[in-house]
Image (cartoon, rainbow, N blue to C red):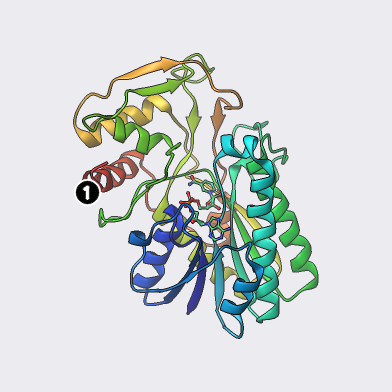
Amino acid sequence: MRLLIPGGAGYIGSHMVKYVQELGHEAVVLDDFSTGHEWAINDCEILRVNLLDQDTLAQLLKGRSFDGVIHFAAKSLVGESVQKPDLYYRNNVVGTLNLVNEMITNDIHNLVFSSTAAIFGNPVTEKIAEDHPKNPINPYGQSKLMAENMLRDICAVHDINATCFRYFNAAGADRSGSLGEAHDPETHLIPNILKSTIPGGSVLKVFGTDYETHDGTCVRDYVHVTDLAEAHFLALEYMKDNSGFSAFNLGNGSGFSVLDVIRSCERAVKKMIPFDPAMRRVGDPPVLVADSSAAICKISWEPKFGSLDAITQSAWRWHEHSGG
Ligand SMILES: NC(=O)c1ccc[n+]([C@@H]2O[C@H](COP(=O)([O-])OP(=O)(O)OC[C@H]3O[C@@H](n4cnc5c(N)ncnc54)[C@H](O)[C@@H]3O)[C@@H](O)[C@H]2O)c1
């Protein structure tokens, strides 16, 4: 297969590129490198373009055929989305629309779209399944929900199939240790815990220690980045027999508190990790855990990294390799 991977130079996208290459397929990366890295992708054609640059996008994709498009390109910092909502709606909604327009023009039929648990807002059930109410509480989540709704409407009238995946917390790194998470700024818990252990790293802050959870800290669902890549690949198979629009939640189905994650990182780095308790952050729900049974059943997804220790160990291999 030949696959177009917008956002393929980013954290999850670069693991996707490696995953499909290892299966012997061709990946073509489309990226503006606004948050992605050239070092994260190897042995593939690169289309260097911003999805908002419609003319260049049209020129680069004209007459090209792909078996599928796996679209990761987005801005995804919640805080920044509150400060710059226009940037988020333009990049994540208009960018996706421009991409889909080119798919229609060039007879490309299958899209896998990175959505997020942030479309659900504050949870009203213990685990979040696909039918959970969708009430995003920030422009980032809202932009992804708008993109999902737009894709649903487009699939209804065009020969396009789309599978949306709402990931919970993507985590971990490729087993080689040579590819992993490198956001700037880094807002994710596991890399920030690991970075705090490196000489000169700032002391870790734990935001909120008085939540109604088993140890007072927030509980989240961590899903390994290679398991996510596998789900995206399986979605291409799924769409062969299931046309139109679909959406699935992707997580491990187990919740781990911030302190559980710190303990797991301590086992990975083999030393104690000090932290400072801090005030709760506005908009952090106490618990967010996925119900991924639909993805497991319908796309035959079998996450391999069920254990938190396997996830933190893979992340630590990458942090050691990359020096932070
Ligand atoms: N990391 C997570 O835990 C998580 C959780 C839920 C959803 N997601 C979604 O998964 C996707 C990938 O996340 P990530 O953590 O790998 O992010 P990332 O920032 O590492 O990767 C995004 C990539 O898209 C590119 N990009 C952004 N806007 C672009 C544009 N307009 N044109 C061309 N390229 C553009 C960036 O340069 C980057 O390479 C995003 O859509 C994100 O919203 C991530």
Depth order, front residue of 95/169: 95
Q: Is residue 73 above or below residue 28?
A: above
Q: Quadrant of residue 21?
A: bottom left
Q: Position of residue 156 (x, y in %)?
A: 79, 67
Secondary structure beneath disc 1? helix
Q: Is residue 235 among the parts visible in the rendering?
A: yes
Residue 39, position in %: x, y?
Answer: 33, 60
Query: Residue 193, image x and y in percent?
Result: 34, 31
Task: Tell me the residue that label 1 is attached to.
Answer: 321
Asked whether residue 119 appears in the rendered view, the answer is no
Residue positioned 65% across, 49% down in the render: 144
- In front: 25, or 48? 48
Looking at the image, which residue sits at the far left?
270
Q: Amino acid at mark 1?
A: His
Q: Residue at x 39, y 74 (%)?
A: 44
Is residue 262 left or right of 76 when viewed as pictured? Answer: left
Q: Quadrant of residue 203?
A: top left
Name the quadrant of the C terminus: top left
Q: Nearer the viewer, residue 182 or 60?
A: 60
Q: Residue placed at 25% from the left, 48% from the top?
A: 322
Q: Residues within 10 Å of mark 1 (few under 14, many from 20)?
A: some
Q: In this picture, is 271 found above or below 7?
A: above
Q: Tell me where residue 106 appears, x and y as whole percent.
A: 65, 81
